[in-house]
Image (cartoon, grey):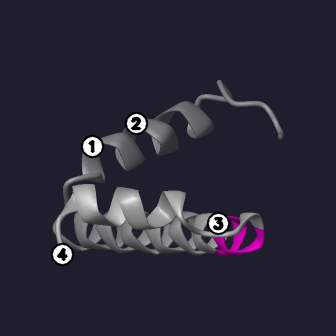
Amino acid sequence: MSVQEIETAITQLSDNEFWKLSDWLIDYRNQLWDKQIEEDVNAGRLDALLDEADEEYEKGLTKPL
């Protein structure tokens, strides 16, 4: 199925079905994002950022949320 076919099908959904799909898409996108972050952490791609955050914390450059 192409994106165009999916878009067309979406326009034919009832309002209730559309909102259910929208919620599902948001949840699915969040799952993909979490997976990407986990892969990046495991591969060490975020090490420099984590080191920088630790350094700023140790210098007292952070504030509580």
Residue at which label 2 appears: 52
**Disc 2 to disc 1: CB gap under 8 Å:** yes
Q: What is the quadrant of the C terminus in the image?
A: top right
Under mark 4, the amino acid is: Met
Which-is-in-front pick, marks 4 and 1? 4
Residue at which label 3 appears: 18
Q: Is residue 38 magenta?
A: no
> Residue 64's image quarter?
top right
Identified at 52% across, 68% down, the residue is 25
Give the structural element (helix, strand or loop) at label 1. helix
Could you tell which of marks 3 and 2 lies nearer the N-terminus? 3
Instruction: Locate residue 20 relative to residue 50 in the image: left or right.
Output: right
Cα–Cα gap, marks 2 and 4: 45 Å
Residue at which label 1 appears: 48
Instruction: Locate residue 27 relative to residue 17 in the image: left or right.
Output: left
Q: What is the quadrant of the N terminus in the image?
A: bottom left
Give the structural element (helix, strand or loop) at label 2. helix
Front residue (pair 54, 38): 38
Under mark 2, the amino acid is: Glu
Residue range of the region highlighted in magenta in the rendering:
16-20
